[in-house]
Image: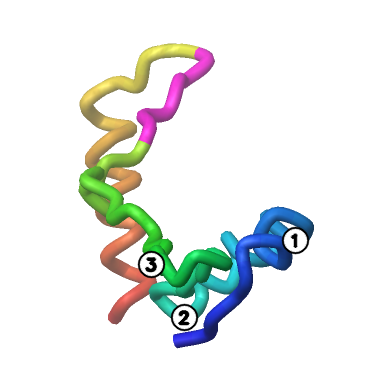
Amino acid sequence: MKSYTFSEARQNFAAILEQARRDGAVRIQRRDGQSFVLTPETQNASPLDIPGVQLARPMSRQEILESIQEGRRSYE
């Protein structure tokens, strides 16, 4: 884990945040001896949570079935 002084962290805050994101944590030390560990917060969202698609017009049942069949043919 990389360590920084408080002054270094204050001057390069964006770079420190990026370092914490890449490495998992960074330590920031104050002059009085106190140290703090900065860690990125884990995301609680599901990786399957994606926005839907807005179609210009509704698709018919037949169009949906044809689209599925076309997708299946590409894997054969």
Q: Is residue 68 visible?
A: yes
List the residue tagged with mark 1. 12
Where in the figure is residue 28, as x and y percent of width and height?
51, 68
Q: Which circle marks residue 37 in the picture?
A: 3
Q: Secondary structure at mark 1?
A: loop
List the residue tagged with mark 2. 23
Q: Identify the mark nearer the N-term, 2 or 3.
A: 2
Position above or below: 51 against 25: above
Magenta-tinted stretch? 51-56
Relative to residue 38, is residue 6 drawn left or right? right
Q: Identify the mark nearer the N-term, 3 or 1.
A: 1
Q: Secondary structure at mark 2?
A: helix
Tell me the amino acid under the disc marked 1. Asn
Position above or below: 64 against 16: above
Q: Quadrant of residue 65?
A: top left
Q: Identify the mark nearer the N-term, 2 or 1.
A: 1
> What is the distance, in whole Å, between disc 2 and disc 1 at their CAs?
16 Å
